[in-house]
Amino acid sequence: MKKLINRVEDVVKEELEGVVAAHSDLVRVHFAPNYVVRADAPVSGKTAIISGGGSGHEPMHGGFVGMGMLDGACPGEVFTSPTPDQILEATKAVSGGAGVLHIVKNYTGDILNFEMAADLAKADGIEVEAVVINDDVAVQDSLYTAGRRGVGATVLAEKVCGAAAEAHRSLKDVAELCRRVNANGRSMGMALTSCTVPAAGKPTFELGEQEMEIGIGIHGEPGRERRALASADEIVEALTKPIVEDLPFKRGDSVLAFVNSMGGTPLIELYIVYRALARYLDGVGVKIDRRLIGPYITSLEMAGCSITLLRLDDEMTKLWDAPVNTPGLRWGV
Amino acid sequence: MKKLINRVEDVVKEELEGVVAAHSDLVRVHFAPNYVVRADAPVSGKTAIISGGGSGHEPMHGGFVGMGMLDGACPGEVFTSPTPDQILEATKAVSGGAGVLHIVKNYTGDILNFEMAADLAKADGIEVEAVVINDDVAVQDSLYTAGRRGVGATVLAEKVCGAAAEAHRSLKDVAELCRRVNANGRSMGMALTSCTVPAAGKPTFELGEQEMEIGIGIHGEPGRERRALASADEIVEALTKPIVEDLPFKRGDSVLAFVNSMGGTPLIELYIVYRALARYLDGVGVKIDRRLIGPYITSLEMAGCSITLLRLDDEMTKLWDAPVNTPGLRWGV
């Protein structure tokens, strides 16, 4: 295992120490239990938004804490759900009296622990709504999931809902918007290589030199099929066709196109993927109105990419364009 | 070779097609010869700035074209210098009558071709100044270099000088500032793995499962030494001590700390590196006033990192903070 780390037990703690050393103007970090909150939390009278899940997907979620996006994030150990007490503490730390939205990716452990934390927070008098993201069209049930996995649409939901919460929209409104983003977002990913969980010390799965996995999950869960390596254009079609057909995205739709690196794939390749995606969508009459290209929801150092399409309406577009100031996403500030 | 590409001959062309498909609001791309210019080029009466070099280091340089940074970039083939005619055409395309600054990384081919292009541009009546960046403390002469290599300080010089040019400072002023950034910037990198140049189809060099290369160049050129894999803290010390001693950075200095991914190293590890760097600098009394963390000057999919320190003064800090709007760096707009 080749990684820039110290002891494997300290990976998450030291990463968070790095985040707060770098970004104390934007965020505060609490340790044991671990959570990240925006530097000015709690913001009185504002709907607060929390997300969380296993670590290993950076910048998601801790890197998305700050003005215009998340109020807090609960990073679990690598690829491990955060605990209920961790989520509860974070919920309390960001609560500004207007309720707290939990954005939860659809993994069984995450769902259970966020539900437990929500119940405890409600018992403490904090209003909580939860929205589950399940945008991955690759497989119906998965290794850690009943139903579809939550992947790239989570990043987009956090940005769009964060902007709405920043405008002091109500918890009910922001939760409704989050459901709308999820309902209009679809994703699929692929891997050229496995990743290695530090505590495991060896690759999560094996892929031959001429193989790739289509429909991979962000923890290396099996996808739709393992097949021979293909060209970028063919890979993009294999990911995009099922996405487009699933919603379905229709001729005349405007979308946000999100081309994501799984961690080990560099930008030069992502732009070749984006080129193929733009051509494919042009061919089916879907218009790209906004885009996000880079490593935003990663699987450690896995090589590969994912594609997320979000059907936009005017409101979502405006919220996407709104200023944001987080370690991982920043514009207009 | 596992990459998200189509034909190896088309990598650079298709990457540029992806860039312009994604960012036509920010940049225009000219093909054959290939160059990227800001969408509003030429900006009349403004000092223009061009950089360039081999492709494979994305987002550098094409991703840094836009308001507040570069006016143009000349991407060569992967790890190959741009040609004189390519640089000349780009110089003409951005010239707004106030002269053009060439920011050149110190590689023999780049130097020769930028010089030739500058001579031709001058013959056409365009005032050109060139500044050579040579911030890499790892080795004195290298595979492609007489003297030190130009690496991470290039990104910082492009941002700082871009802000100065945006404020309509003169060519002479901006060139002087660029020399000051170079004089106050020092870098060193390391690799956990090699990268694979698409046209070569196999890794540039071999590293054992328990080995790393300290002082690596951004094209995989040999560094100071190949040694046994070590902890992130030890690696950071091995990179930072020579950087600090070289300038030297002194107790009380304020710096911009730039922790860069070579392409295949994900953010979770970069923050562990940043944590170690912050501790090391704290120990020698150097204060981090600004920072940049992410993949900004990459070597295809190489795993590893580099560290750049830039000693700041008030002027550089203000220019660093100024708004920038490019595909690869964006804030305050």
Image (cartoon, coloured by chain):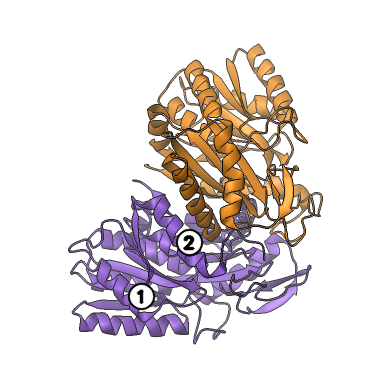
Chain colours: A purple, B orange
Please give the chain letter of the residue carrying mark 1: A
Dot 2 or dot 1: first in sequence order is 2
Horizontal side, residue A233 vs residue A333: left or right: right
| Residue holding disc 2 | A14
Say whether residue B95 is visible. yes
| Residue holding disc 1 | A86
Q: Amino acid at mark 2?
A: Glu
Residue A94, quarter of picture = bottom left
Relative depth, front residue between A106 and A65: A65
Q: Position of residue A145 (x, y in %)?
A: 51, 84
In the image, are marks 2 and 1 on the same chain?
A: yes
Density class for disc 2 (Cα within 10 Å; few <14, some 14-19, many ≥20) is many
- B6 to A251, vertically: above or below: above
The total number of labels drawn is 2
Q: Dividing the image into 4 quarters, which one contains the N terminus of chain A?
A: bottom right
Q: Amino acid at mark 1?
A: Gln
Q: Mark 2 or mark 1: which is in front?
A: 2
Q: Position of residue A48 (x, y in %)?
A: 27, 67
Say whether residue A57 is visible. no
Residue B95, quarter of picture = top right
Q: Position of residue B178 (x, y in %)?
A: 52, 25
